[in-house]
Image (spheres, rainbow, N blue to C red):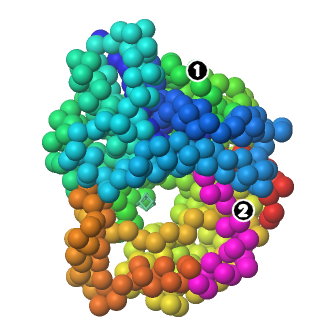
Amino acid sequence: MNCLILSPPVHQPSEPPAGAYLLAGALAARGIAAPMLDLSLEFFHYAMEQSGMNTKPALKYMTAPPEGVYDTHRHAGHSGVIASALRSFAASFPGWSLTPMDCSPPRGLHRILDTPVSGTPFSAFLDRVLDPVLEKHGTSLVLVSTAYLSQLPATVELAAFLRRRSLRFLVGGSVFNSLSSTGGGLELVRRVIPEVVAHDGSDLMPDGKPVLDSITHPVLLSGRPYLSPAPVIPAAFTTGCIWNRCLFCPDRARPFRYLPEDTLRDFIASAPRESMIHFVDSTIPAHRLPGVLEALRRNRARFFGFARATGEYLAPGFLDALAASGCSMLQWGLESGSREILRRFHKGTDPDTAKKVLREAGGRGIRNYVYLLFGLPGETGDDREETLRMIREIGRDVDFLNASVFNLPLECELVRRRGEFGMELGEYDAGSDVIRLYSPFVCDGRDPRREAKGFLRGEFGKDPAVSRILRNTPKWFRAAHMAFMGPDSPR
Ligand code: SF4
């Protein structure tokens, strides 16, 4: 068997899509030819060329900033040019919108499942880019890996394209796993793409073992450059989450498993030299980090990923070792500064410890990217104020901030136990999409999401400590590009 792995547009073109990359690498490690073509990367380059705008200086900056480091202001300017070019390209397709991170069709996602697709931003692109690849790389099975809803419109069209070419193919990826386990609408997708499967890919492994038990770096077919100053390589210690207890989490259904330690070490050691390793774990298991630090150092690699702000990071010498081994940025899901909120939803972290961890990490030059979650059931004005106070206290050590409003997964522990939290599930708006991951809700007659939005627009967003961090946080090309941001970003 030889396979071709395709990742449809659109996901951001700064790094290879983790799901497709790791699937291709797992098949390659088992002796199956499985090159990967990142159609999203190809599509962004195509769209920029077709836009008629001069994006060359922006692309040059994104791929080769001075000394390999982005400056906040220049990055904002150049990513703005790229976003304008994409907007200009999309303007030829009425109702479509396209950004460096997202794509939406006219009148909602479900419309693309109702109406035969043609004349979309992807139609001419697929003919031009995919046919030559298929001709050159004969394949017995095409595997389409779709991770985000932003890829769904192109996935529908790609499936139709592959069918017209009489190719055998399967369509999988985390978005279908999510629709199947915690969302709704998968049956509608399957009406249009019967080839959709919702599993973790282990069925495709000839040895029947978990996908990431054997992994190598796949062959990448695109000749186009990723928009980053160094190769960004996805890697993982685990599948599922090591904590797996937060009541609001949509990922708790995923079974937890460690990769074999030597498999990950070899994978890092064989990555292109001076790569940026992106640990894509739901949360990096801190106790496993020491096992890969030497491989990172020897390869002169840097790394970033999600971490839990627990006392493990305060062990003597621990953060020093991370900083000395290329830890560029840690993404902390702090969620709230309210101890009561963290306790109620089983977050398992403490605000005082978290503040200390961030101070210590920031003091060692590790960038801190903080995620906050407002609008959880029962959240009060006092809870929100505590979160704001926490940010004021540690603001100098917070480089980037993502303050989001809670979305209730259609299926999760919190939904099952909603009575305990005074929650009632609400009704969808008439115009809302039927492909859905989330459910409306009210809590003791109140809408905490609406209250949270008001707070974010008002007091929180206007606070000088918060607005300084938000100004520093890039609008486009998040995560991977933040790990490349220079120390000249105002602290
Ligand atoms: S730490 Fe994150 S991924 Fe893990 S259970 Fe909590 S919310 Fe989910």
Q: Is residue 408 above or below residue 451?
A: above
466 drawn magenta? yes
Q: Can residue 325 be seen in this view?
A: no
> For this rendering, which residue is in front, 262 or 251?
251
Q: Is residue 103 above or below residue 117?
A: below
Counting from the top left corner in percent of width and height, residue 16 is at: 53, 34
Q: Is residue 300 visible?
A: yes
Residue at 71% over, 30% down: 274
On screen, residue 416 versus residue 262, left or right, reads left
> Which stretch did the figure color magenta?
458-479
Q: Are marks 2 and 1 in contact (CB under 8 Å)?
A: no
Q: Is mark 1 on a helix, strand or loop?
A: loop
Q: How crowded is mark 1: few (under 14 residues within 10 Å), some or many (20 or more)?
A: few
Counting from the top left corner in percent of width and height, residue 123 is at: 38, 32
Give the residue type at disc 1.
Gly
Q: In this view, does 325 lie above or below 464?
A: above
Residue at 15% over, 42% down: 191
40 drawn magenta? no
Which residue bears the numbered disc 2? 472
Counting from the top left corner in percent of width and height, residue 59 is at: 69, 36
Which residue bears the numbered disc 1? 223
On screen, residue 47 versus residue 26, left or right, reads right
Give the residue type at disc 2.
Asn
Give me the C-alpha separation between circle 2 and circle 1.
32 Å
On screen, residue 386 versus residue 108, left or right, reads right
Counting from the top left corner in percent of width and height, residue 102 is at: 47, 50
Dominant secondary structure (helix, strand or loop) of the stretch shown in magenta: helix
> Could you say which quadrant of the image residue 397 lies in?
bottom right
